[in-house]
Image (tube, rainbow, N blue to C red):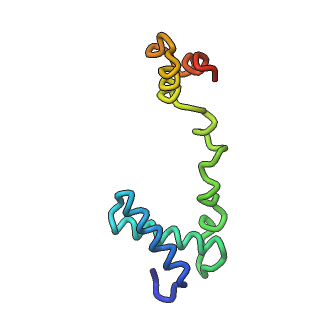
Amino acid sequence: MPPGSSAKHVRQYEHIKETAQERGVSEERAEEIAARTVHKKSARSGESRTASDLFVHDLSSARRGGPGSPSAAEGPTRDELYEEARKKNVKGRSNMTKSQLARAVGR
């Protein structure tokens, strides 16, 4: 973190860095992720003197990929439907398409 950073930003930075490293990211990459994330959050809240329009007007990370995302609209994957069909002992499930599996399990 740059000198003069608030204690809150330092805590956020350390937490994000540790979390990234726990996921297996290298220390250098984890530091970059943490610094960018803290900078973006401070820019959005108006705490940063230099904030690009991208940071300020972009969707927040909390809203990105939520229930309205395309992947959520597609429903369960074929593999998920197949597992459900296997549990219900649906005959011929291995040759079924995703839509056929969905019908067979009642979705």
State left or right for residue 28 relative to residue 2. Answer: left
Q: Position of residue 83 (x, y in %)?
A: 48, 26
Q: Position of residue 62 (x, y in %)?
A: 62, 58
State left or right for residue 33 relative to residue 59. Answer: left
Number of residue marks: 0
* Residue at the image point whose x is 47% and y is 70% from the top: 15
Image quadrant assignment for residue 29: bottom left
Q: Residue furthest top?
A: 91
Q: Residue furthest bottom?
A: 4
Q: Where is residue 21 in the image (x, y as percent from the top left)?
A: 37, 63
Is 33 placed above or below 95 here? below
Near-viewer residue (33 or 58): 33
Which quadrant, please, contains the C terminus?
top right
* Residue at the image point whose x is 59% and y is 59% from the top: 61
Image quadrant assignment for residue 52: bottom right
Is 93 placed above or below 12 here? above
State left or right for residue 20 relative to residue 66. Answer: left
Q: Position of residue 91 (x, y in %)?
A: 49, 10
Near-viewer residue (44 or 17): 17
* Residue at the image point whose x is 60% and y is 67% from the top: 55
Which quadrant, please, contains the N terminus?
bottom left
